[in-house]
Amino acid sequence: MNTSQDRVEKVFAMPFASVYPLYVAKVERKGRSKGEVDQAISWLTGLTEDELAAHFAKGTSFADFFEAAKINDRAALITGVICGVRVEEIEDPLMQKIRYLDKLIDEIAKGRPMEKILR
């Protein structure tokens, strides 16, 4: 039986590099750029472009990716709904970090200015 916890564990084990192109495609469809995605990821995680590339090359899971990250102190200012759930109310710390990133990508795709997205 595929429980909710099984689905969550699959997300945590998913390679970050497999989701990244989907983030880029989403924002590019709306006239935004890969550079803006990278800027948001760097702001949230503290990772440089080279560190990000190394995670892609290794096939790092979401869990390990966020374990290596130093989450921005201002990330708690990210609020709103993603997938029907308020990001500020997510109890699992790893899932909250993943949803923070999802919310940043959504804001880029919606045309919000980067200076507002990066709080």
Image: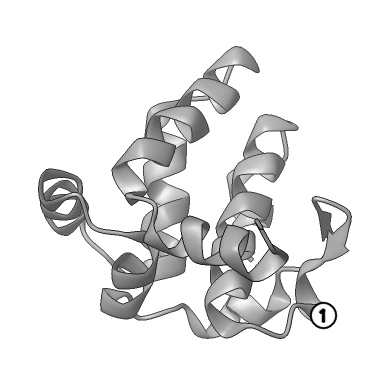
Q: Which residue is mark 1?
A: 89
- Residue 31 is situated, as x and y percent measured from the top left of the image, at 59, 15
Label 1's element?
Answer: helix
Q: Nearer the viewer, residue 7 or 94?
A: 7
- Count of numbered labels shown in the rendering: 1
Residue 61: name its quadrant: bottom left
Can I make out residue 80 in this image? Answer: no
Residue 117 in the figure: left or right of residue 22: right
Q: Amino acid at mark 1?
A: Glu
Residue shown at the point (57%, 26%) measured from the top left:
27
Q: Quadrant of the N terminus?
A: bottom right
Q: Residues within 10 Å of mark 1 (few under 14, many from 20)?
A: few
Residue shown at the point (60%, 14%) measured from the top left:
29
Can I make out residue 84 in this image? Answer: yes
Residue 61 in the figure: left or right of residue 58: right
Q: In the figure, 25 relative to 38: above or below?
A: above
Which colour style is shown?
A: one colour
Q: In the figure, 31 relative to 67: above or below?
A: above
Q: Nearer the viewer, residue 33 or 115?
A: 33
- Residue 87 is situated, as x and y percent measured from the top left of the image, at 76, 69
Residue 43 in the figure: left or right of residue 50: right
Residue 87 in the figure: left or right of residue 24: right
Residue shown at the point (15%, 46%) measured from the top left:
53
- Residue 50 is situated, as x and y percent measured from the top left of the image, at 11, 52
Residue shown at the point (64%, 66%) measured from the top left:
119
Q: Nearer the viewer, residue 37 or 60?
A: 60
Q: Nearer the viewer, residue 7 or 52?
A: 7
- Residue 64 is situated, as x and y percent measured from the top left of the image, at 29, 71
Q: In the figure, 100 relative to 108: above or below?
A: below
